[in-house]
């Protein structure tokens, strides 16, 4: 008996029946399936250092389990010192059993090693049932030896499906094990925020504060102050006058002493 990958068995036995119930397909052939997985990696610095292409080829080959090929530039770009036919990237296309094996390893071993992983974004669909995923570090794959890495770099992974819509493709990939981010937390937060305003509107505290009799006290206070103002004003005026007179006398004495000293020096 030939070897069949685990995810392929799961797809044929369980995933197909779930998708038929979910989308009510008339025929089994209408059920979407995963056609291929493309792993691509751009190496723009290879224009100056051609050894980087060899490192990228080895890494992608170890990750995918299939020999990767170098992608060539299609036109000349003078500003980047790029000529037509120069290697600028690496890619590999997986189909059949290797495709399911890579997906199984990617979901079970690689994604859990991502730092602060909280799920895969659901915004990578292109509208035709294909999903694009970016990996920032190649060291999440256990096949990569950290001691032999030349530079930490990422890659793009494209899942090509036969689905007609993004909803069907997302359902298929989630059934195969891709952990998409859930939107329940945002919905719960919105419902909690919606419940808060009615509680604030029902509180009758504002009316009690508005009816406080502070205005009457404020009106009566100026009358009391007006009665006490004359005595305090007289005292202040007299004190200011005496202070000004004494201050003027002191200044005059200082000026006379300074003038007299100057005249003595001149004589």
Image: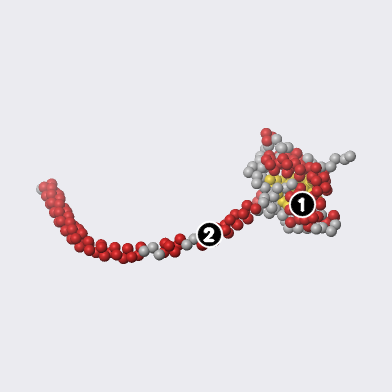
- x, y percent for residue 263: 12, 50
Q: How is the image coloured?
A: secondary structure
User: Which one is in front, 204 or 97?
Assistant: 204
Q: In this image, 188 relative to 160: left or right?
A: left
Q: Which one is earlier in the sequence, the residue at label 2 or at label 1? A: 1
Q: Nearer the viewer, mark 2 or mark 1?
A: 2
Measure how far apart labels 2 and 1 are at the Cα level. 43 Å
Q: Secondary structure at mark 1?
A: helix
Based on the displayed image, in which of its 4 quarters is residue 138 positioned?
Answer: top right
Residue at the spot x=40%, y=64% of the render?
Answer: 211
Residue at the spot x=57%, y=58% of the render?
Answer: 195
Mark yes or no: residue 44 visible: no
Q: In this image, 57 relative to 184: left or right?
A: right
Mark yes or no: residue 37 visible: yes
- x, y percent for residue 226: 24, 64
Residue at the spot x=76%, y=58% of the render?
Answer: 165
- x, y percent for residue 131: 73, 52
Residue neighbourhood size for the residue with mark 1, other residues' Cα within 10 Å, grouped as few (<14), some (14–19), many (≥20): many
* Number of numbered discs visible in the structure rendering: 2
Residue at the spot x=76%, y=44% of the render?
Answer: 103
Query: In the rendered view of the protein, which quadrant contains the N terminus?
Result: top right
Q: Which residue is mark 2?
A: 199
Based on the displayed image, in which of its 4 quarters is residue 189 positioned?
Answer: bottom right
Q: Which residue is mark 1?
A: 172
- x, y percent for residue 192: 58, 56
Q: Secondary structure at mark 2?
A: helix
User: Which one is in front, 222 or 198?
Assistant: 198
């Amino acid at each position: 008996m030939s070897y069949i990958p685990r995810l392929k068995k799961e797809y044929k036995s369980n995933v197909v029946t779930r998708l038929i119930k979910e989308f009510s397909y008339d025929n089994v052939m209408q059920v979407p399936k995963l056609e291929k997985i493309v792993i691509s990696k751009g190496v723009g610095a290879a224009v100056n250092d051609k050894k980087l292409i060899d490192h990228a080829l080895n890494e992608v080959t170890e990750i995918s389990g299939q020999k990767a090929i170098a992608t060539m530039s299609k036109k000349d770009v003078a500003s980047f010192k790029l000529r037509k036919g120069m290697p600028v990237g690496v890619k590999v296309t997986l189909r059949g059993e290797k495709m399911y094996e890579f997906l199984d390893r990617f979901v079970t071993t690689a994604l859990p090693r991502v730092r602060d992983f909280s799920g895969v974004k659901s915004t990578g669909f292109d509208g035709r049932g294909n999903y694009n995923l970016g990996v920032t570090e190649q060291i999440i794959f256990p096949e990569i030896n950290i001691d032999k890495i030349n530079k930490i770099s990422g890659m793009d992974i494209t899942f090509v499906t036969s689905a007609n819509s993004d909803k069907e493709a997302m359902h298929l990939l989630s059934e195969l094990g891709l952990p998409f981010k859930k939107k329940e937390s945002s919905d719960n937060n919105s419902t909690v925020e919606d419940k808060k305003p009615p509680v604030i509107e029902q509180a009758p505290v504002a009316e009690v504060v508005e009816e406080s009799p502070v205005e009457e006290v404020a009106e009566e206070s100026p009358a009391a102050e007006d009665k006490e103002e004359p005595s305090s004003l007289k005292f202040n005026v007299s004190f200011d006058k005496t202070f000004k007179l004494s201050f003027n006398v002191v200044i005059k004495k200082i000026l006379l002493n300074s003038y007299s000293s100057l005249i003595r020096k001149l004589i």
